[in-house]
Image: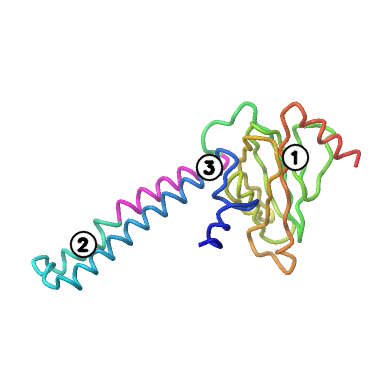
Amino acid sequence: MVAIGAGCAGDLSTLEPAGPSASAVARLWWAMLMAALLLFLLVVGLFLAIVFAPGIGRRISPESWIVGGGLALPLPILVALTVYAFWLGEHQLRGGGRLPSEMIRIEALATQWNWRFEYPDLPGAPTTLGTVHIPAGRTVEIAVTSDDVVHSLWVPRLGGKIDAVPGHTTYVRLRADTPGRYGGQCSEYCGTGHAGMRFEVLAHSPEDYPAALNDEQRQ
């Protein structure tokens, strides 16, 4: 139990969200867990009822058990979870709702085995490798592509993941509630260096954000 609990926290934990997008993912995870637990308890309860009271279900036909237990019971739960998951995905990707007026655009290029970030909204800002700078409290849309194979950009505490596909651009929106450091990684196996293809997100207060990029350039 200690080992399981330790996996629910930390720099790459989806269950320790630090922004609204990641919080929505965590809520979906908990909803799926609760739904699975309810179904599990129901199945175990039916099994125990049959073991200790063998004649309890004889008045119900086999067809009714199949239709009721195999369709009527799980189908509403699965449909509700699927609709919520699709709605959540659309609002984390480009096209899900209106573009926030204060949104910051960042471009990410994945290569074997590193991440390169550019900042088109800040002319003269340097390109950064392995580190992406964002302002806290503002929505960031990252345009993601790849220079070689399929990668996947993921910052567990700030939002969902998105594939980096060669010759194609995908988009994901992130938001950090407070300044700080957040770990990110490639979540798609991309070759022998995949395990080390990590990066970090540095969220700065809005007033410190341009200065942080200037400091990066001087380094």
Looking at the rendered structure, the kind of residue marked 3 is Ser
Image mark for residue 133 = 1
The location of residue 84, given as percent across then percent down, is 42, 45
Residue 17 sits above or below residue 68 on the image: above
Q: Nearer the viewer, mark 2 or mark 3?
A: 3
Spatial CA distance of label 1 from label 3 is 21 Å
Spatial CA distance of label 2 from label 3 is 36 Å
Residue 104 sits above or below residue 42 on the image: above
Q: Nearer the viewer, residue 61 or 203?
A: 203
Q: Determine whether the residue tagged by mark 3 lies in a helix, strand or loop.
A: helix
> Label 3 belongs to which residue?
23
Res 102 quadrant in image: top right
What crowding class fits label 3: few (fewer than 14 Cα within 10 Å), some (14-19), or many (20 or more)? some
In this rendering, would 159 be left or right of 151? left
The magenta segment is 75-94
Image mark for residue 67 = 2
Q: Mark 1 and 3 residues: CB-CB less than 8 Å, in contact? A: no
The location of residue 31, given as percent across then percent down, is 41, 49
What crowding class fits label 1: few (fewer than 14 Cα within 10 Å), some (14-19), or many (20 or more)? many
Residue 43 sits above or below residue 152 on the image: below
Q: Mark 2 and 1 residues: CB-CB less than 8 Å, in contact? A: no
Of labels 2 and 3, earlier in sequence is 3
Q: Determine whether the residue tagged by mark 2 lies in a helix, strand or loop.
A: helix
Res 121 quadrant in image: top right
In this rendering, would 194 be left or right of 14? right
What predominant SS class does the magenta segment belong to?
helix
Q: Nearer the viewer, mark 1 or mark 3?
A: 3
Of labels 1 and 3, earlier in sequence is 3
Spatial CA distance of label 2 from label 1 is 53 Å
